[in-house]
Amino acid sequence: MSISSNILSLRQQVATACELAKCDPASIQVEVAGKYATADQLQEVVDAGLTLIGENRVQAAQEKVAHVRGATWHMIGHLQSNKVKKAIQLFQMVESIDSVKLAKVFAYELSQVGKTMEVLIEVNVSREINKAGLPDESLYHAMKEIVDLPHVRVVGLMTMPPFTEDAEASRKHFVKLRTLRDKMQRKFDILLPHLSMGTSQDFGVAIEEGATIIRVGRSIFGGIA
């Protein structure tokens, strides 16, 4: 297998999922998880047309951004407050805002450079103890503070359900995130167009439940000869 053949297979799977969900494949952003990929591999992916890359760590992104041309970078991992200043230089979106405190640090650092950044709020819908993200019962009160912060524009929610090879086991978590998003839109009278959910093993179900961003790594880099 090769990266190009894996991407072709991935595109076909996304198209099939979109057919079931009655949505346009063009509405789905395929985000390539770069955690275990080299800069050269990511360049190959970008050259093949998948230009959105998600990185878990600021340091890893810093090493790759300079070597990969034509990519858009999203932060998808847990972010420490002391890394925010560097993060706003490297990324076009942060998908892992998981506290009011972190959002306020973002607002401050962005104000220092006169920049506004789109963010997603990460929600721990499965309530796993060791997983990042706001508890779903805390989302409303956190959003109440975050949506009014200057320079920070909330455009949706993100979640990472428990790992499973059974895609159907993830469905309830995706439904929960979509329901929360719909509820927050009504509560705050704002548009939250993005749901970042679904990875290589369950993105088809995620698309059926309303995902707009799917995060894939193994689907692209797995099984490469």
Image: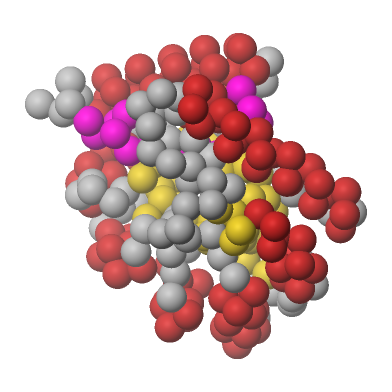
**Residue under the image location 31 percent in, 48 percent down:** 34
88 relative to 13, above or below? below
Q: Is residue 106 visible?
A: no
Q: Position of residue 115 (x, y in %)?
A: 63, 75
- Count of numbered badges drawn on the protein: 0
**For residue 178, side relative to residue 46 (left or right):** right
Residue at the extreme left: 225
- Which residue is at 61% across, 58% downward? 135
Q: Quadrant of residue 173?
A: top right
Indicate the position of residue 73 as horizontal and vertical percent values: 44, 55
Magenta stretch bounds: 208-222
Relative height, residue 187 to residue 138 (above, below): above
Looking at the image, residue 146 sits to the left or right of residue 52; the answer is right
The quarter of the displayed image where residue 136 is located: bottom right
Q: Report if residue 21 lies within the magenta region.
A: no
Camera-side residue of 38 and 97: 97
Return the residue found at the far bottom.
112
User: Measured from the top left, where is residue 1 in percent x and y?
Assistant: 17, 20
Residue 56: tell me if it is visible: yes
For the C terminus, the image quarter is top left
Q: Residue 218 in magenta?
A: yes
Task: Pick whichever, 41 or 153, lies toward us.
Answer: 153
Position of 131 relative to 222 (above/below): below
Q: Position of residue 181 (x, y in %)?
A: 73, 46
Q: Residue at x 54, y 59 (%)?
A: 133
